[in-house]
């Protein structure tokens, strides 16, 4: 491979990888008091979903709702792969980043739990990444905060 063809190949790879991050889905947010439904593809999980392919448990808490939501925010800000990009009272939208992809996560405070949703921006399958990520967040959320 010549030096020029190597540079062209590297540029093509960089452009393709940048395209993998995708743009966030326009229907994110709270609509009629709930988060958006998951698409039919298996790269989304939501506590609002009723089918086993997409369903995941919400974040349960027993402390006051505002304290629980602050605890969630701390859990999310402590993660190296997570950036909070939108914050409203009782609602957070985050971007989860991996080496090649960006996924959108949402958290909605309800009376006795926090509804969750995480979906890939691109592709069909996420090989379970959105589910495993939210399960890890749930485990961290259930632990007492370090003071």
Image (tube, rainbow, N blue to C red):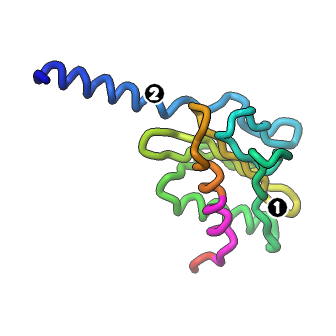
For the C terminus, the image quarter is bottom right
What's the CA distance linking mark 2 and mark 1?
35 Å
Tell me which segment is drawn in magenta: 135-144
Residue at 72% across, 62% down: 69
Mark 1: few, some, or many residues within 10 Å (few <14, many ≥20)? Answer: some
- Front-lying residue, 132 or 32: 132
Q: Position of residue 9 (x, y in %)?
A: 25, 24
Secondary-structure class at tag 2 = helix
Farthest residue to the left: give it: 2
Indicate yes or no whether the magenta region holds residue 141.
yes
For the N terminus, the image quarter is top left
Q: Position of residue 108 (x, y in %)?
A: 77, 51
The residue pinned by badge 2 equals 19
Q: Is residue 106 left or right of residue 122?
A: right
Q: Position of residue 141 (x, y in %)?
A: 67, 68
Residue at 84% across, 56% down: 110
- Vertical order, 41 against 108 (above or below): above
Write down the quadrant of residue 6 in the picture. Answer: top left
Magenta span: predominant SS is: helix
Mark 2: few, some, or many residues within 10 Å (few <14, many ≥20)? Answer: few
- Front-lying residue, 18 or 29: 18
Indicate yes or no whether the magenta region holds residue 131.
no
Q: Is residue 10 left or right of residue 80?
A: left
Q: Position of residue 101 (x, y in %)?
A: 49, 39
Residue at 82% across, 61% down: 113
Q: Is residue 69 left or right of residue 136?
A: right
The residue pinned by badge 1 equals 113
Evaluate if marks 2 and 1 touch, with contact meaning CB atoms under 8 Å apart.
no
- Vertical order, 35 against 16 (above or below): below
């Amino acid at each position: 491979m010549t030096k020029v063809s190597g540079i062209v190949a590297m540029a093509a790879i960089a452009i393709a990888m940048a395209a993998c991050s995708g743009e966030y889905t326009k229907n994110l947010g709270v609509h009629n008091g709930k988060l958006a439904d998951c698409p039919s593809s298996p790269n989304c999980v939501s506590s609002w979903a009723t089918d086993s392919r997409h369903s995941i448990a919400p974040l349960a808490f027993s402390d006051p709702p505002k304290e629980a939501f602050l605890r969630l925010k701390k859990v999310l800000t402590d993660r190296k792969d997570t950036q909070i990009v939108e914050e409203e009272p009782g609602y957070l939208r985050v971007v989860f980043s991996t080496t090649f992809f960006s996924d959108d996560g949402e958290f909605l405070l309800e009376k006795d739990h926090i509804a969750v949703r995480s979906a890939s921006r691109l592709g069909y399958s996420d090989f379970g990444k959105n589910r495993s990520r939210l399960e890890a967040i749930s485990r961290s959320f259930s632990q007492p905060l370090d003071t």
